[in-house]
């Protein structure tokens, strides 16, 4: 019960060193929620376009402006997105919004490296202005990124830090007066939960920080 000082004694503790990989993944992705989705668009050295969603994605710093992507392997082989980022040094992160949920889900399909996910999902493509990478043309918010650092994660794949060189915003989006905040209620971002579940924006609560 809430406020029970001995409630911690009833907690179940799962040792991650004895849990298997599937159990660790399911625990992590059902507890660290909702997660923003990095809908990453890249181009291969052969010119093949790729776009894929990653929910191990986060903001890292504002100066320099950095974002992180943890990109796993498939069958022990680097995924197309990671290989393209390392080969080309550029990528875009498209912010997934409610109208794009179904299209984003289509790009999660495991296609061969020679297939174009933009075409597969029926997405329009355009070229970024500040980096050499494609982006989803009708996405209202896009981060144009340059590879800042790559950290090998062994069997887990690789951690990519990208420096945001340009922020592309649909002119229909409102910037909150007196700031550079994009109006979240207009953006309508989608978050990732566990399994096949996603969270929509829902109610926004404004809770000012206490002043001492």
Image (cartoon, rainbow, N blue to C red):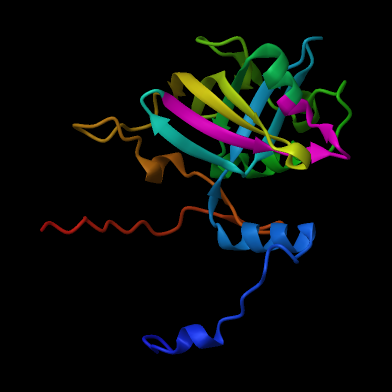
Q: Can residue 118 be seen in this view?
A: no
Quadrant in the picture for the N terminus:
bottom left
Residue 110 appears in which quarter of the rendering?
Answer: top right
- Say which of 19 and 210 sits in front: 19
Position in image of residue 133 (x %, y %): 63, 14
The number of numbered discs placed on residues in the rendered structure image is 0
Q: In this view, does 102 lie above or below 62?
A: below
Residue 77 counted in the magenta span: yes
Q: Is residue 130 visible?
A: yes
Residue drawn at x 51%, y 40% as measured from the top left: 58
Residue drawn at x 69%, y 19% as measured from the top left: 86
State the residue lying farthest toward the left. Answer: 212
- Say which of 158 and 198 sits in front: 158
Residue 97 counted in the magenta span: no
* Residue 101 relative to residue 206: left or right: right
Q: What stretch is highlighted in magenta?
A: 65-82
* Residue 7 relative to residue 92: left or right: left
């Amino acid at each position: 019960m809430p406020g029970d000082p001995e409630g911690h004694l009833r907690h179940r503790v799962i040792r991650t060193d004895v849990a298997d990989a599937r159990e660790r993944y399911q625990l992590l992705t059902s507890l660290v929620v909702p997660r923003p989705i990095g809908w990453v668009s890249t181009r291969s050295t052969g010119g093949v376009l790729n776009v894929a969603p990653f929910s191990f994605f986060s903001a890292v710093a504002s100066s320099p402006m950095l974002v992180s992507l943890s990109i796993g392997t498939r069958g022990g082989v680097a995924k197309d997105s990671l290989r393209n980022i390392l080969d080309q040094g550029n990528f875009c992160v498209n912010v997934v919004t409610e109208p794009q949920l179904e299209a984003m889900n289509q790009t999660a399909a495991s296609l061969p490296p020679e297939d174009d996910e933009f075409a597969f999902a029926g997405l329009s493509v355009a070229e970024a202005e500040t980096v050499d990478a494609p982006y989803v043309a009708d996405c209202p918010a896009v981060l144009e990124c340059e590879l800042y650092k790559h950290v090998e994660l062994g069997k887990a794949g690789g951690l990519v830090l990208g420096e945001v060189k340009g922020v592309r915003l649909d002119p229909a989006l409102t910037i909150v007066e007196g700031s550079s905040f994009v109006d979240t209620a207009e953006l309508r971002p989608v978050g990732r939960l566990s399994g096949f579940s996603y969270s929509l924006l829902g109610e926004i609560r404004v809770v000012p920080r206490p002043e001492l």
